Amino acid sequence: MTDVSTVHEVPIRGEVDIVHVRQAAREVAVSVGFSLVEQTKLVTAASELARNTLKHGGGGVAEVELERGSGHTALRLVFRDEGPGIEDVDLALTDGYSSAGGLGLGLSGARRLADDFELRTEPGQGTTVTVSFRSRTGPR
């Protein structure tokens, strides 16, 4: 049986909230025994996706969820906004593409770092990005 619980819900309304998302993700990762490398991947993806939520979606919310099952522990980050959505998902997931003048590594970078990546978007309806990270060091 798998148990999923939301550990933190962080509103994203300004730059400082990106730091709050990073801190919440790291706190949970440390508490369940993620290695330093696992924490770094998780926090990097959290930062990129929180920034995208703010910059492209006009703000939104991040949820840090913990999934525990027999023999596994995973951390899931869910980013939701009610912004304009993504018109061309394939283009947005291309390394180096940026509609806002950045490095263009937000979505594509998060996808590479995560064990699982899901993007749901509809023009005019907002975007939800979900990334999951499984602990390689085992559950505590």
Image (cartoon, helix red, strand yellow):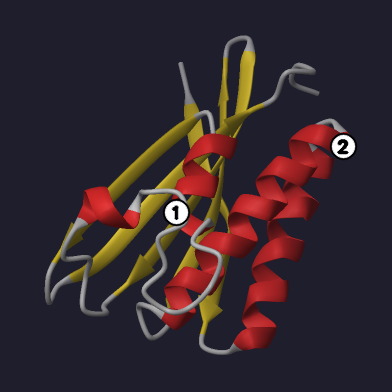
Front in this rendered view, residue 66 or 86: 86
Please name the residue shown 77% across and 52% down the image. 26
Is 9 displayed left or right of 22 in the figure?
left
What is the x, y in percent for residue 109?
54, 47
Q: Secondary structure at mark 1?
A: helix
What is the x, y in percent for residue 52?
46, 70
Q: Which of pointers 1 and 2 lies earlier in the amino acid sequence? A: 2
Q: Amino acid at mark 1?
A: Leu
- Badge 1 is on which residue? 107
Is 83 displayed left or right of 15 in the figure?
left
Please name the residue shown 32% across and 58% down the image. 128
Density class for disc 2 (Cα within 10 Å; few <14, some 14-19, many ≥20) is few
Density class for disc 1 (Cα within 10 Å; few <14, some 14-19, many ≥20) is many
The image quadrant of residue 79 is bottom left
Q: Up-down: is 64 above or below 71?
A: below
Q: Amino acid at mark 2?
A: Leu
Is 51 displayed left or right of 127 in the figure?
right
Furthest residue toward bottom: 14
The residue mark sitting in front, 1 or 2, is: 1
Please count the marks in the image. 2
Front in this rendered view, residue 138 or 35: 35
Which mark, by number, is residue 36? Answer: 2
* Gap between marks 1 and 2 measured at Cα: 22 Å
Circle 1/circle 2 CB separation < 8 Å: no
What is the x, y in percent for residue 137?
79, 18
Q: Up-down: is 10 above or below 58?
A: above
Furthest residue toward right: 36
Please name the residue shown 32% across and 57% down the image. 92
Please name the residue shown 82% across and 42% down the image. 31
Q: Secondary structure at mark 2?
A: helix
